[in-house]
Image (spheres, helix red, strand yellow):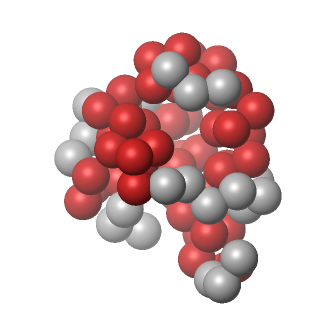
């Protein structure tokens, strides 16, 4: 991972966004059709999300991609 501090900051941002709309990790995983463990890993900075995942997560949270990545 080339930018661990940014990956960690994004994970914190994603968790806050998810919680602000009242979704659990499982809810987001189901809506985005991504495994719950992947959501956990992204939020805990163990995995850097791909652009495809970011697009899918933004749709699941009903946000634009720029809103999702503005942290």
Q: Residue at x 37, y 36 (%)?
A: 56
Q: Depth check: give the residue in front, 34 or 40.
A: 34
Q: Is 29 situated above or below 56?
A: above
The quadrant of the picture occupied by the N terminus is: bottom right
Q: Residue at x 50, y 36 (%)?
A: 18
Q: Position of residue 27 (x, y in %)?
A: 56, 17
Q: Is residue 53 left or right of residue 5?
A: left
Residue 46 in which image quadrant:
bottom right
Q: Position of residue 26 (x, y in %)?
A: 64, 19
Q: Position of residue 53 (x, y in %)?
A: 46, 44
The quadrant of the picture occupied by the C terminus is: bottom left
Can residue 22 be seen here? The reply is no
Q: Depth check: give the residue in front, 18 or 38.
A: 38
Can residue 41 be seen here? The reply is yes
Q: Residue at x 57, y 27 (%)?
A: 34
Q: Depth check: give the residue in front, 64 or 49.
A: 49
Q: Is residue 55 left or right of residue 35?
A: left
Name the residue at the bottom extreme.
2
Residue 39 in which image quadrant:
top right
Residue 21 in which image quadrant:
top left
Q: Position of residue 54 (x, y in %)?
A: 41, 48
- In this rendering, the count of numbered labels is 0
Q: Depth check: give the residue in front, 64 or 18.
A: 64
Q: Is 61 situated above or below 58?
A: above
Q: Residue at x 54, y 34 (%)?
A: 19
């Amino acid at each position: 991972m080339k930018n661990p501090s940014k990956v960690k900051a994004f994970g914190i941002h994603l968790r806050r966004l998810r919680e602000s709309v009242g979704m659990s990790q499982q809810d987001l995983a189901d809506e985005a059709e991504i495994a719950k463990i992947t959501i956990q890993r992204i939020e805990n900075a163990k995995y850097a999300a791909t652009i495809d995942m970011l697009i899918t997560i933004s749709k699941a949270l009903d946000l634009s991609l720029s809103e999702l990545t503005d942290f």
